[in-house]
Amino acid sequence: MKYRSKEEFDQANMFGTGPANTVCFEHISGQSYMNLLATPEQTPAFVANLTFEPGCRNNWHVHHADEGGGHILLCTAGEGWYQEEGKPAVALSEGSAVVVPIGVKHWHGARADSWFSHIVVDLPGVNKDNEWLEPVSDQEYQAL
């Protein structure tokens, strides 16, 4: 379901918007928010609810690990996009799930006309690292 109004979206965003995302804000076009649900101190996985305002998306990036790792995205409110390099973008909506494998260049974020929220589960791994790359251009994004 699309949410153009922040007030309407907040009612559907059951895991909470949280404060402005200051962890990786320099790798995001637009405003995002992060509500921590579990940290590595509490569990082997990092779990957070990430919220994107309409049009917000992260840069292309790759998750690396020598062993294990990767991400799972569980879409909880609104509508968004996920795209792997060389493949068409996939529309995401409430209930969608994406497994992001290690070594795959990708990006994700909100549709231009909807707030979007997903839980990210950062899976445990050995020597994990995120490689942040170029922004998704306005031309690429507007073509969706």
Image (cartoon, grey):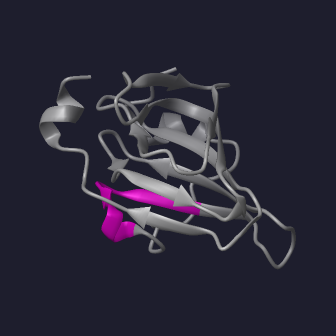
Picture coordinates of residue 114, whole percent (x, y): 39, 31
> Image height check: is 125 above or below 84?
below
Closest to the observer: 119 or 12? 119
Count of all numbered marks drawn on residues in the image: 0
- Tell me which segment is drawn in magenta: 25-34
Q: Quadrant of residue 96?
A: top right
Q: What residue do we see at 35% from left, 57% from top?
A: 31
Picture coordinates of residue 67, whole percent (x, y): 73, 61
Residue 102 is left or right of residue 137, and the answer is right
Query: Residue placed farthest to the left in the image?
Result: 139
Residue 8 is left or right of residue 87, and the answer is right
Q: What residue do we see at 42% from left, 43% from top?
A: 106
Q: Quadrant of residue 89?
A: top left
Query: Residue placed farthest to the bottom in the image?
Result: 41
Closest to the observer: 6 or 132? 132
> Image height check: is 60 above or below 27?
above
> Image height check: is 19 above or below 87?
below
Picture coordinates of residue 70, whole percent (x, y): 65, 52
Q: Quadrant of residue 38?
A: bottom right
User: Residue 48 magenta-drawn?
Assistant: no
Q: What residue do we see at 54% from left, 57% from top?
A: 63
Query: Residue placed farthest to the right in the image?
Result: 43
Residue 50 is left or right of residue 83, and the answer is right
Q: Which corner quadrant holds the C terminus?
A: top left
User: Residue 27 magenta-drawn?
Assistant: yes
Picture coordinates of residue 21, whole percent (x, y): 46, 67
Residue 25 is left or right of residue 99, and the answer is left
Q: What residue do we see at 34% from left, 39% from top?
A: 54
